[in-house]
Amino acid sequence: MTVVQERPEFTSERQALYEQARHGPGRAATEAQHAKGKLTVRERLDLLFDEGTFNEVETLRRHRATGFGLENKRPYTDGVVIGWGKVHGRTVFAYAHDFRIFGGALGEAHAQKIHKLMDLAEAAGAPVVGLCDGAGARIQEGVTALAGYGGIFQRNVRNSGVIPQISVMLGPCAGGAAYSPALTDFVFMVRGIAQMFITGPDVVQAVTGEEISQEGLGGADTHTSLSGVAGFAYDDEESCLEDVRHLLSMLPQNNRELPPSEECDDPADRRNDVLGELVPADANRSYDMRKVIEEIVDHGEFFEVHENWATNVVCALTRLDGHTVGIVANQPAALAGVLDIPASEKAARFVQLCDAFNIPLVTLVDVPGFLPGVDQEHGGIIRHGAKLLYAYCNATVPRISLILRKAYGGAYIVMDSQSIGADLTYAWPTNEIAVMGAEGAANVIFRREIAASDDPEATRAARIKEYRSRLMHPYYAAERGLVDDVIDPAETRVRLIRALEMLRAKSAPLPSRKHGNQPQ
C-alpha cells in the first residue's frame, strides 16, 4: 500500500492558518467578550455539542469587500463559525456568530457560509441551531449584506416544518436580523446580554419621544412575558445551552421521522390517585394544571414552552411511556383558564409545531369560554381564536383530548373536541360540557319565568338545577358519542398511554393542495 505523505511546509502552513482562525482576533477581543459576561463562539459550541464531535467547515473563508476600511481587515471565518456535530449522539448543524469580528455583523461571505450550512442541514435532514450574537447587516458591504439576510429568510421558510430550527439569542439582534429568529421554531434568550428589536431605543425616542433601555425594549424578559417572541429566558449561557440540548433530545431529526423514544422505568400502569385531590370538583375553584401534568407524565418532567407568556394556557413537550408528546392545557390558575388572543396564538403555534414534527397531541380541557370584552373583540379574538381552530383541524398526528371539568361554548369546540377531529375524547366524572354554564343558560332560557315569579331566586335556583341535571350531567356527551369514555381520574396515565400506543401508526392524509389559507 502506498502512503502519501504531506510536505512538511504544507502541514505547518495549514496548521498555522487554522490556529489563527480558531483563536479569533486576539486576546484583547476575547477579554472584552468575557468582560460583557459573554462566552466566545467556540466556548459556546463546546457547550452545545457532545465533546469532540464538532466538524467545522469554511474556517478560512474571508470577505472580498474593499473600501470603507475593510481592505486591510480580512479575518478568517468572517465572523461566523459553521459546522455540524452530535447532540446526545444525533447529528445537529449550527452556525455561531463571533462578536469579536466586526461585531458579528453579516456581510456577503458571512451570509454565504450560513446559506451553505442551512442547505447542508436540509440535505442531511437534521436540525439547525443558530447561536446569534451579531450587530446586523455590515454597513460597509451595502445591499449585498441585505441580500444575504434575504437568503437566510428564504431558507428559514423553506425548511419550516421540515427540520427543527432553533435560535439562541446570546447578544444583540437588531433590524432585519430579528426576522430570522422569528421564523424559527424556538427562540432562547439569555438575560442581560441578549436583545431583539426592529428599531433601537435611540430611534424609538427620536420618533415617539419614549425613553426605554435596550433590555426594557427587547430583553429576554420582555420577549418571554410581553411579546411572546421568545419562548425561554435564562440567567446564564450554560443553563440555556443545556436546555437547547434537552429540547433537541425530544425532537425528531426531520418531518419524515417519529420523535425519539427512550426506555422508561416509570410504570405505564401507574395510578394517579392524587388527581382527585389536586382538581377540585367545584368548577369555580382554581388549581394549578401544571401539577396535573406532573402527575400524569413520565417522572413528572415536562419542558414548557412560553412559560411566562399567555399563562392561561400551558404548552409543553414531555414523554409518556418514553415517547414524546405535546400537551396543550387550559390553566385555571390564570384568568380561570379562559382563551384570549395571546393564549389562542400560543396554543395554535404549538399545535402546528407538533403536527409538523409528528408529535402526538394530548389536550387537557378545563375552559370556561373565550374572554369577553371590547378590547378582545376589537383586537380580533374571532380571527385569533380561529387560528387555534385551524391548527387543530389541520393536524394529522394522534390527538387525544381529556375534559377534566368544564368545557363551555366555542372554547369547548376549539380545544380539540371530537367534532373537529380528535381521535379519542375522554372525560372525568366531574366534566360539564355545555353551550354555557348552568347559571347563564337558565337566565337566558327561563328569563321571563324568573322575572314573573313571586320568588325569582328560588325559581332561578330550581331552573339552574334542572338545566344542569338534564344537559350537563357527566354522561350526557358520552350518551351522544361526543365523549368516548368517562374515566376514573386515577386511570388517566394508563388510558392515555394505551390510546397513544394504538394511534402510533395513524395515517390521515390531507387533500391535495398547495397550502391552506389560515387565519392571520
Image (cartoon, rainbow, N blue to C red):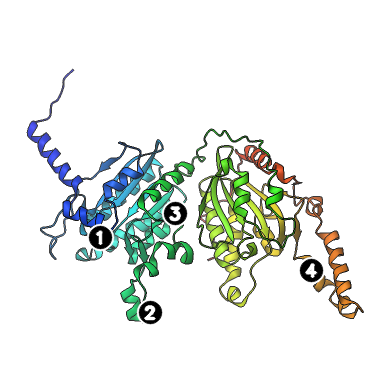
Amino acid on which the number 4 mark rests in the picture: Glu
Asked if residue 481 lies left or right of residue 401, the reply is right
Question: Quick one: SS at disc 3?
Answer: strand
Image quadrant assignment for residue 342:
bottom right
Above or below: residue 171 compared with residue 198? above
Q: Are marks 2 and 3 in contact (CB under 8 Å)?
A: no
Cα gap from disc 3 to disc 4, whole angstroms:
42 Å
Image quadrant assignment for residue 310:
bottom right
For disc 2, the marked residue is: 210
What residue appears at the point 75 percent right and 64 percent down from the top-left corner? 435
Q: Are marks 3 and 4 in contact (CB under 8 Å)?
A: no
Cα gap from disc 1 to disc 4, whole angstroms:
61 Å
Tag 2 or tag 4, which sits nearer the N-term? 2
Question: Quick one: SS at disc 1?
Answer: loop
Mark 1 or 4: the one toward you: 4
Cα gap from disc 1 to disc 2, whole angstroms:
27 Å
Question: Quick one: SS at disc 4?
Answer: helix
What residue appears at the point 29 percent right and 55 percent down from the top-left corner? 38
For disc 4, the marked residue is: 439
Amino acid on which the number 1 mark rests in the picture: Ala
Q: Which residue occupies the foreground of this view, 462 or 64?
A: 462
Tag 4 or tag 3, which sits nearer the N-term? 3
Tag 3 or tag 2, which sits nearer the N-term? 3
For disc 3, the marked residue is: 186
Outermost residue toward the bottom in this view: 209
For disc 1, the marked residue is: 105
Query: Looking at the figure, which quarter contains the N terminus?
Result: top left
Amino acid on which the number 3 mark rests in the picture: Phe
- Which x, y percent locates residue 413? 68, 59
